[in-house]
Image (tube, helix red, strand yellow):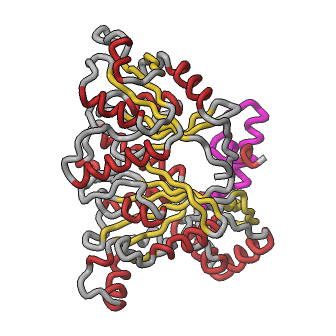
Amino acid sequence: MASKLPTVAIVGHANAGKSSLFNRLVRSKQAIVAAEAGTTRDNVIGTVDLGDRQFRVVDTAGLKPAEDEFEASIQDQIADAIELADAIILVIDSTNYPDQKDRDLAKKILRGQKPTFLAVNKTDLKESLPTDEFRRLGIKNIVPISAEHNSGIRRLVDQLAETLPKAKEVQEDDILRVALIGRPNVGKSHLFNRLAGKQQAIVAPIAGTTRDVNRVSLRYHGQAIELLDTAGVRRSGKIERGIEKFSVLRTVAAIDEADVCLLLMDVNELSTGIDQKLAGMIAEAGKGLIIVISKWDSVEGKDAFTRDALAPQIIANFDFVPWAPLIFTSSVTGQNVSKLFELVSEIAAERNRTITTRKLNDLLQKAILRHPPAGLKNTHPKFRYIVQTDHNPPWFVIYGSNFKFIHWSYKRYIERQFREEFGFGGTPIKFSFRDEKQIKANKERAAQGLEPVTKAYKQAKDDQ
């Protein structure tokens, strides 16, 4: 980040409405909101943009006794968020009288001597108590709100803006976004923490720990990188309605947002159908892909021979993405974790490569001479020329005629020739075929006020 933005931590007991307030502040559905207490587990970070200034907001899990190691890690994250914040919003449910737990929490926050705001939530309900009932907590700045109905939010934002130092983030347009994708409990959060170099996501041996998309920004050899840790995706039949379904949708959104995806698989449970489906989704979205075999430290008697025996099996199951590199890692020992940054950087460079039109056409003509396309009598596909039209992923448009006769296997042949010549490792490459005869015919029909007979006319307009 080019400048440090002030941070506001949202804290409170479970189901007080913290995530609803967070979403109102950042004006998005970034945090999962549900009637189930304890929905938020990881600290979720967003940015409030007021035009001339910005500040960060951290949505924390609900405060409750740390009854086990997992719950203790959640409470430690909340304590860290409070300590690092420049201001704190304590959210309380206005339908319940403040009890000893609320008073203890308020004392704990006030002890830090940071600007603190008491957001008395759900004031739209008939059961809500008078605001004066909450003054005994000792917090002077009390703002009645209804996060669900957007009441009182503007007043809270204005008070925060008056309290926080004025700052604005300089947006970088060269951020490389890397998403960690996979089934539940394959080690995404462990790897996320290793890559981030700190305990950002909660790590526990409980499938489905991560529900929100966790983010952290860092730099690698001068390159700004944003890591996205996603919830695990189960088979369709095992996806519960509600919160878990939202988590799956966030995983899909993370794939769309990312430049490169790390598809993690547990070495002890390889190549399930959902892994192949996820790889297909990543490739279809045009994103870079690295197949990451995690928990390599758990394999007994592991050696190069074991890896060499496993690799062909895995590659065979993912033969539809032969361009994706395969790597064996361990977040416990750190094996090959730093290598992932190298691979990501190499793939990002491949995705942004530009090939000159001359080189493209030289290769296309050589490929055609080596293996001419098949067709019907006197109606063979004819390739005239090729141009590169886009990057990230690389996209090429081939112009010619009779393209409706091109077999899918010939398109794969063209792609293989390009990869052998130019590389493009780790990224899908896209090809579009523009039939000039159809384009011309549709232009003539359009001039006469008639509907085009194929999509080629729209494609021709897009090319102009």
Task: Report if residue 211 lies within the magenta region.
Answer: no
Position of residue 73 in the picture relative to residue 372 (left or right): left
Q: Of all residues shown, which one is farthest toward the left? A: 67
> Is 339 placed above or below 72 here?
below
Q: Is residue 379 visible?
A: no
Q: Residue at x 33, y 89 (%)?
A: 303
Q: Nearer the viewer, residue 461 or 389?
A: 389
- Residue at image position (25%, 53%) is 70
Give the x, y percent position of residue 66.
Answer: 23, 46
Nearer to me, 376 or 398: 398
Residues drawn in magenta? 430-459
Which residue is situated farthest in the bottom direction here? Answer: 305
Give the residue at x 64% y 30%.
50
Residue at left offset 31%, top offset 78%: 297
Residue 223 higher or lower than 339, as above or below: above
Task: Look at the image and say whether residue 436 sits in the magenta stretch.
Answer: yes
Q: Measured along the vertical axis of the image, is residue 302 above or below residue 76? A: below
Q: Position of residue 56 (x, y in %)?
A: 55, 40
| Number of marks in the rendered image | 0
